[in-house]
Image: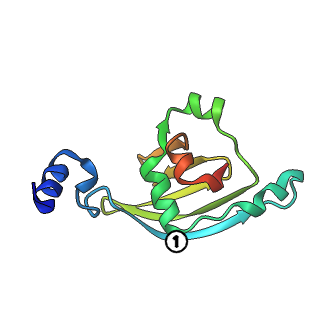
Amino acid sequence: MKAGVMAALLCTTLAACAPVRGDDAIEVVSLQRQVDNVHADADICRALTLSRDQVARYFALAEVVDPATFDAEAIIMPCSYRGTLRRGGKLYQWEIFAGGAAYLYDGAATNQRYLCREPCLAALPGLR
């Protein structure tokens, strides 16, 4: 079997061959680092760095959870990145904390909570 035919067959069975841009595409419009140096554990925050690509990857891989699960499992550190992103043509505000917890909201109907679990933590090891 020729390589081109084999690749075409693989693409028909793998979701990874889907177009990268679509209605779910995430464009990070802005990001800003936040550190609350008043807290004693602020030293942990030195290692937290996120790029626009990593923020988009986070929201593609992290799990949306209900408020009770978020309250029980989220670790809110004194450092985060926050900003705005566009998904499906709509603008949202977001905040991702060191430790992997995050919020995504639009000031209206959307108020989601996220936790970064595997494979999210594997893709973004700097959140640990």
Residue located farthest toward the front when viewing the structure as drawn:
1
Q: In the image, what residue occupies the spot 65% across and 65% down?
A: 49
Q: Quadrant of residue 83?
A: bottom right
Q: In the image, what residue occupies the spot 52% across and 40% down?
A: 118
Q: In the image, what residue occupies the spot 27% across and 64% down?
A: 21
- x, y percent for residue 91: 40, 62
- x, y percent for residue 101: 61, 45
Residue 11 in the image: above or below residue 46: above
The number of callouts visible is 1
Closer to the camera in the image, 49 or 112: 49
Which secondary structure, mark 1?
A: strand
Viewed as shown, does residue 70 lie left or right of 48? Answer: left
Closer to the camera in the image, 26 or 90: 26
Report if residue 26 is visible in the image: yes
Q: In the image, what residue occupies the spot 90% across and 52% down?
A: 40
Q: Quadrant location of the N terminus?
A: bottom left
Closer to the camera in the image, 3 or 91: 3
Viewed as shown, does residue 70 lie left or right of 39? Answer: left
- x, y percent for residue 79: 72, 57
Residue 32 in the image: above or below residue 47: below
The kind of residue on which mark 1 rests is Ser
Q: Mark 1 points at which residue?
A: 30
Task: Categorize mark 1 by other alpha carbons within 10 Å: few (<14), some (14-19), many (20+).
Answer: some
Report if residue 107 is visible in the image: no
Viewed as shown, does residue 66 lie left or right of 41? Answer: left
Colour mode?
A: rainbow
